Image: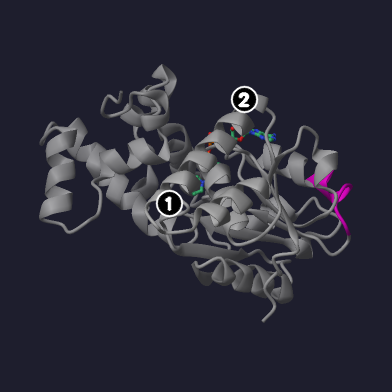
């Protein structure tokens, strides 16, 4: 198997909702994990949260207390990108913005070893475009986890036009070794899941705008009659409206303004207001 061995160091850049989940899973799988964020407090919060989750898992008998302690000890906060020089795989989970991601990977290229793999957790941005400015775009691949990372098995392994098949296979096998169900995909706007999910959210917003029903009713109908685990509004509150809105905009623009993917002005206002969902204490619902 071509999976990275537990001795390989994994770096996770961005310690928000997704980065902390990826770090939790990678450290539990035996890797030394280096966690970086431009906001130091995000790393502190992530490490504390992961520690609490490991303890709860140990209390429930899902891992031993010794395993929980060992996994916690494998997690390290780093304060400079230079500190990830020994990473065999860097997984980026920062803001959903092409230029910011490109800038980060350009910097990383000068730091990590020649054979290190660069992976992005982007939800929708072209892997080809993110890699295009790199000296070696063949080592850039999408490693798209779903939220919450420890509970969601699917990982889309996305190849851009320049991605080396060997790199995609290593990431695929590594995700499998972490207990995930990876799937290979090519870089198309929104990839597989975020493409087919767009109408789910868009029709929810349209129903709300036409005052067909309130968000709680629409969510309940989709859950109870539609068989979905979550309705569109509770799911967007979990994902974060800033992230979800950026993804819709990116898919809309990539398809030259196809009206099927038109972003919602209601959601734009939620983002303007900072009503970003669970992480902000308020989204379509109120929390805490
Ligand atoms: P988040 O806002 O919770 O966390 C992002 C973190 O990145 C923040 O802590 C921020 O301080 C940090 N950051 C921003 N710019 C940075 C930089 N230049 N260098 C280092 N750190 C930086 O966001 P998230 O929900 O974790 O999403 C991160 C990525 O994962 C996005 O690309 C998003 O599209 C993708 N994603 C999100 C979800 C989801 O459900 N939220 C699911 C799959 C993929």
Residue 182 located within the stretch drawn in magenta: no
Q: Which quadrant of the figure contains the N terminus?
A: bottom right
Instruction: Give the residue number, with chain letter if any, for mark 2.
Output: 41
Which residue is pictured at 30% across the width and 45% down the height? 201
Is there CB contact under 8 Å for labels 1 and 2?
no
Q: Position of residue 163 (x, y in %)?
A: 71, 67
Element class at badge 1: helix
> What residue sits 43% from the left and 54% below the top?
194
Q: Ligand 1 quadrant?
A: top right
In front of the other: 128 or 90? 90
Q: Residue at x 84, y 65 (%)?
A: 115
Q: Is any part of residue 85 visible from this angle?
A: yes
Identify the residue under disc 1: 57
The residue sitting at the top extreme is: 273
* Residue 177, position as x, y percentages in the image: 58, 71
Seen in the picture, residue 264 relative to 33 is either above or below; the reply is: above
Range shown magenta:
106-113
Q: Is residue 285 left or right of residue 273?
A: left
Task: Name the residue located 36 percent from the left edge and 59 percent from the top edge.
Answer: 196
Q: Is residue 125 visible?
A: no
Q: Earlier in the sequence, mark 1 or mark 2?
A: 2
């Amino acid at each position: 198997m071509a999976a990275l061995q537990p001795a390989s160091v994994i770096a996770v850049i961005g310690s928000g909702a997704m980065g902390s989940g990826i770090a939790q899973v990678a450290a539990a799988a035996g890797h030394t994990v280096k966690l970086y964020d431009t906001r130091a407090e995000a790393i502190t919060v992530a490490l504390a949260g992961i520690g609490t989750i490991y303890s709860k898992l140990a209390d429930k008998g899902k891992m031993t207390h010794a395993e929980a302690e060992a996994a916690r000890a494998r997690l390290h906060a780093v304060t400079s990108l230079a500190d990830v020089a020994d990473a065999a795989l860097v997984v980026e989970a920062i803001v959903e913005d092409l230029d910011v991601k490109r800038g980060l990977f350009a910097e990383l290229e000068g730091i990590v070893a020649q054979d290190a793999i660069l992976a992005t957790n982007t939800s929708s941005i072209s892997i080809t475009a993110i890699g295009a400015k790199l000296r070696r775009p063949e080592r850039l691949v999408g490693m798209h986890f779903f939220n919450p990372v420890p509970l969601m098995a699917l990982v889309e392994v996305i190849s851009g036009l320049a991605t080396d098949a060997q790199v995609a296979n290593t990431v695929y096998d590594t995700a499998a070794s972490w207990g995930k169900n990876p799937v290979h995909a090519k870089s198309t706007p929104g990839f597989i899941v975020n493409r087919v999910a767009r109408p789910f959210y868009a029709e929810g917003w349209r129903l709300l705008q036409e005052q067909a029903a309130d968000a709680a009713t629409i969510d309940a109908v989709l859950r109870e009659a539609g068989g979905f685990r979550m309705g569109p509004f509770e799911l967007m509150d979990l994902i974060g409206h800033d992230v979800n809105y950026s993804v819709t905009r990116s898919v809309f623009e990539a398809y030259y303004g196809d009206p099927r993917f038109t972003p919602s002005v209601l959601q734009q206002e939620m983002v303007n207001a900072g009503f970003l969902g669970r992480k902000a204490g308020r989204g379509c619902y109120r929390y805490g």
